[in-house]
Image: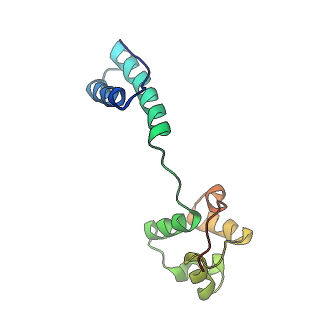
C-alpha cells in the first residue's frame, strides 16, 4: 500500500483510478483498507476543490415541490394566499419564521436551509 496526500489534479485522477480498481476489494484485505483511506483522501480533496453549495431557500423549495409533484396552490396553507405564494416563489417577498416552520414540516427541508439569506428581486 503506497498512499500519499492528494495535492494536485494529477494526484486526484490517479487516486480515483486506483480507487476504481480496488473499490470492491474483500473486507479485511490490504486493498480494502487502501480503498477506505483513498476514499477519505478523495472526499477531502473534492470538498476543497469542487465544493457543492446548497441552493438558496427558494430554489430548494422549488426543487422539493417538483420532487413531490406539488403546485403553488399546495403551499397556500404554509405560506398564505395564492398571491403570497407567488410573491415568495418569485423572490418578491422574504420567508417569515412561521412560513419556514410550516414549510419545514410540509416539504421535509431543514430549517437551516430555509433561513439562509437570498436576494429579493425588484
Along the line of sight, the residue nearer the viewer: 23 or 60: 60
20 relative position to 102: left or right: left
- Residue at image position (42%, 25%) is 6
Residue 81 in percent (x, y) is at 64, 86
34 relative position to 101: left or right: left
Q: Is residue 19 above or below residue 1?
A: below
Q: Quadrant of residue 24?
A: top left
Residue 120 in percent (x, y) is at 62, 73
- Residue at image position (56%, 68%) is 58
Q: How is the image coloured?
A: rainbow
Q: Quadrant of residue 67?
A: bottom left
- Residue at image position (59%, 68%) is 106
Q: Is residue 34 above or below residue 59?
A: above
Residue 59 in percent (x, y) is at 51, 66
Count of marks, rendered view? 0
Along the line of sight, the residue nearer the viewer: 64 or 45: 45
Quarter the C terminus occupies:
bottom right
Residue 41 in percent (x, y) is at 45, 27
Residue found farthest to the right: 97
Quarter the N terminus occupies:
top left
Along the line of sight, the residue nearer the viewer: 3 or 27: 3
Amino acid at each position: 500500500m503506497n498512499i500519499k496526500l492528494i495535492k494536485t489534479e494529477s494526484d486526484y485522477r490517479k487516486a480515483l483510478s486506483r480507487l476504481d480498481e480496488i473499490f470492491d476489494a474483500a473486507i479485511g484485505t490490504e486493498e480494502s483498507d487502501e480503498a477506505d483511506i483513498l476514499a477519505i483522501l478523495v472526499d477531502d480533496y473534492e470538498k476543497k476543490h469542487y465544493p457543492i453549495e446548497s441552493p438558496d431557500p427558494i430554489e430548494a423549495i422549488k426543487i422539493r415541490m417538483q420532487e413531490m409533484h406539488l403546485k403553488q396552490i399546495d403551499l397556500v396553507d404554509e405560506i398564505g394566499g395564492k398571491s403570497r405564494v407567488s410573491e415568495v416563489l418569485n423572490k418578491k417577498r422574504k420567508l417569515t419564521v412561521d412560513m419556514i416552520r410550516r414549510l419545514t414540516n410540509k416539504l421535509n427541508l431543514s430549517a437551516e436551509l430555509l433561513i439562509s439569506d437570498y436576494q429579493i428581486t425588484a
